[in-house]
Amino acid sequence: MAVEIFSDPARAVSIVQNDSSIMFGGFVSAGSPSNLIMALHNSGQSNLTLMANNIGLGDKLDLLCESRQVSKVIATFAIRASGGRQSNFEQQYHKGEVGLELVPQGTFAERIRAGGAGIGGFLTPTGVGTMVAEGKEIMHVKGKEYLLELPLRADYAFIKAYKADTQGNLVYRGASKNFNELMATAADCVIAEVEQIVEVGSLRPSQIHTPGIFVDRVVQCDPVEIRWE
Amino acid sequence: MAVEIFSDPARAVSIVQNDSSIMFGGFVSAGSPSNLIMALHNSGQSNLTLMANNIGLGDKLDLLCESRQVSKVIATFAIRASGGRQSNFEQQYHKGEVGLELVPQGTFAERIRAGGAGIGGFLTPTGVGTMVAEGKEIMHVKGKEYLLELPLRADYAFIKAYKADTQGNLVYRGASKNFNELMATAADCVIAEVEQIVEVGSLRPSQIHTPGIFVDRVVQCDPVEIRWE
Amino acid sequence: MADGLSRELIALRASRELSDGMIVNLGIGLPTLVSNFIDGLDITLQSENGILGYGNILEDDFEPDFINAGGQPVEILPGASFFNSAESFGMIRGGHIDVAILGGLQVSSIGDLANWYVPERGGGSIGGAMDLAVGAKKLIITMAHITKDGAPRIMNECSYPLTAEKCVDLIVTDLAVIQCQDQQLTLVETAPGISVDEIINLTAAELIIDSNVKEMSL
Amino acid sequence: MADGLSRELIALRASRELSDGMIVNLGIGLPTLVSNFIDGLDITLQSENGILGYGNILEDDFEPDFINAGGQPVEILPGASFFNSAESFGMIRGGHIDVAILGGLQVSSIGDLANWYVPERGGGSIGGAMDLAVGAKKLIITMAHITKDGAPRIMNECSYPLTAEKCVDLIVTDLAVIQCQDQQLTLVETAPGISVDEIINLTAAELIIDSNVKEMSL
């Protein structure tokens, strides 16, 4: 299961089929795999289920909605309560053209971690007594009420790291670990966009954030300028 | 909640009372807070509940049993199936003088993590159909059988790191993260033994393993030579 | 009736709840302004996207990987650390955050919070709000006391979908500071020029008037 | 009857199940010896105490923080990484380990494993065995075919407390290699000088004899 190194994001994402579920790392601008998203946009694959922290105006992921590649989104931020110009996703959502599962951010992170760690479910106090509890099992432990939340996995994870070595070991910069580090464990095929690829041994073992065994494909790309609107 | 820096392990552990529950990081020789254990041994506090990966012949923790300070142990390794000389813990256990809760290692790690992360319980396939399942709730999710395991917390955590800065940020070396990094989140009072204390700012933010907000007391000690028998 | 506090003054009043050694999470919007008023305090700011120990919002330089949960570039202070979202919410849900200051849409008489969904607009997102409301040791809500249409936001029961039940400890509005303890609301401070009766009239929940109720000192 | 395989030869035979690219966890005791036979293979060794990518056991230097789960000091190879025990068992339970090789006390006809507790001695510890048995994609058990008293260790039902149910994929003993698939045991290889009948006699479970059963090539 050696990692495959690519120089072209289009080649790296060419295995993605229609009807796939895909996790996207990143939190707004931090650690967003923008080159991979653009390559998927160009590939034209459709009926995709996206899992990402945020999809909004200015997010590259919204381009996938513009081109009608998306059937469902699982996210923590997707619809704004404030007015103003709507994202493509929002427009399609309000017309009932795409599905949405809105998840509290901590629960989203924990579900992905559970999916990667063989945990069959977990109890969280988050969401008790809210719309998020609908349809979920409520459990009482030591007098406290919890929701049973289930793991999340996907066919693919698109993630962004700062550096990779040639065995696929990854190091993140700043606040870009966010969902990238978790999603790397929770998909059947993990594709990482990185700014630099270095020789094995040049990353210190105690510095490695994602061990290479989790990563299937690595592609070196110059970062895309991104700002949130 | 600024961290307190001590130069003497005896002072650092002097807050521990009789009847306390204490987590001890370390896996055999790696990351064992030996100076803190010796200080606790000398303190004479008793009726303690210990939570640690291993307690066996040659482990410093076994000294706490020798001096009859221990009423219960929660561990993954405590009783050897092979013959030979017995630890103090084993002798007392076989006579019914100390209690033991034996936990699968992955479940032990996950229970401590849950205790620190506000997770009320989790479902694991580990232990299904074994003695470990006795008295536990069995849950079925998507046709698979799981045990509901509950979080672990303690009054104190004794941990060992390589370096601390003066804000209590910790860095571990090699395979010494093991339970140290988890226990740092799961006790009311966390006492860290470290080999070096450095100025704030000299540890890179992306290198820090345990943020200082988890740590209450830091003491610099020369490491104790330890080998497993 | 006099004007209520500006957003800045609401943030200033909220900042008075903070003290040395606290670990604090500031929500998006008004709560972010609180960071303008904590100079000189030894406070560690946590941002749920995975930073502990950030400082000022940076206006000029934009480094995409060094942002807070609102997407704003922030200064990284000595002693800061970075972590993933599961670790970040482990901190939050696990009770390691002393104070969270969030914006609010409605607060009920027993401290229920609604702050994520506006039914009239059919929109809203959860983000980290539900976890922060449940996990922070103390939850302070900053908001306008009434809606633009003049309807009270503090009411017997929230009409908007909840963020969390019985989670609010303190409400700081443009008109008042209201404590929420033991599922009761107590008016403890009034904004300059605002009377107790005005506040009672603009609040749709029973309000105990603290015997020491006083005007805010700003 | 001829002598069965030595511990080293059991380890050698088990090593033949490994191939390039695999991520492998070797249990304490006999399985550790497997690492002597993987030179030239591109295999990544995981140790549940938090190392991925270790190499030889080091006889001389003892660095307390650089040990495997058996407490032995190990060489750290280029590309190695370290992680905590929750992450390590996330890897294991999450299906990221291709092969685990563990010692065994008993294996049942449907692949149940008992390897942690010896009732006669009133002792045993679980360690990582239960998680590895449940989590590894393929589980290979190495053990003596019979006890010192001559009793079979492969039997219809384990008499010792279980480590995990229906988890074993392959058993390598001093006498035989037995596949465990679809809750059936199939004898696929015999040790040099050991007959199929001898193995049947020393096995207390129904054994299908593979049509291609052959002597191990060591």
Image (cartoon, coloured by chain):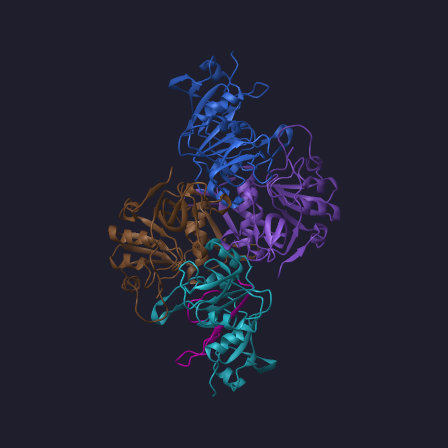
Chain colours: A brown, B purple, C cyan, D blue
The residue at the point 30 percent across, 67 percent down is A86
Say which of C208 and D92 sits in front: D92
The part of the chain drawn in magenta is: C136-164
Say if A197 sits above or below C195 in the image: above
Any magenta on residue C150?
A: yes
Kindly indicate the quadrant of the structure image that contains residue B30. top right
Residue D123, horizontal then vertical, whole percent: 63, 32
Residue C172, horizontal then vertical, whole percent: 51, 75
Say if B141 sits above or below B89 in the image: below
Say which of A220 and B151 sits in front: A220
Kindly indicate the quadrant of the structure image that contains residue A198. top left
Say if C195 sits above or below B126 in the image: below
Give the main secondary structure, helix, strand or loop, of the magenta stretch.
Answer: loop
In this picture, residue B194 sits left or right of residue C146: right
Kindly indicate the quadrant of the structure image that contains residue B27. top right
In this picture, residue B133 sits left or right of residue A117: right
Say which of B88 and D168 sits in front: B88
Quadrant where the N terminus of chain A sits is top left
Residue C45, horizontal then vertical, whole percent: 52, 64
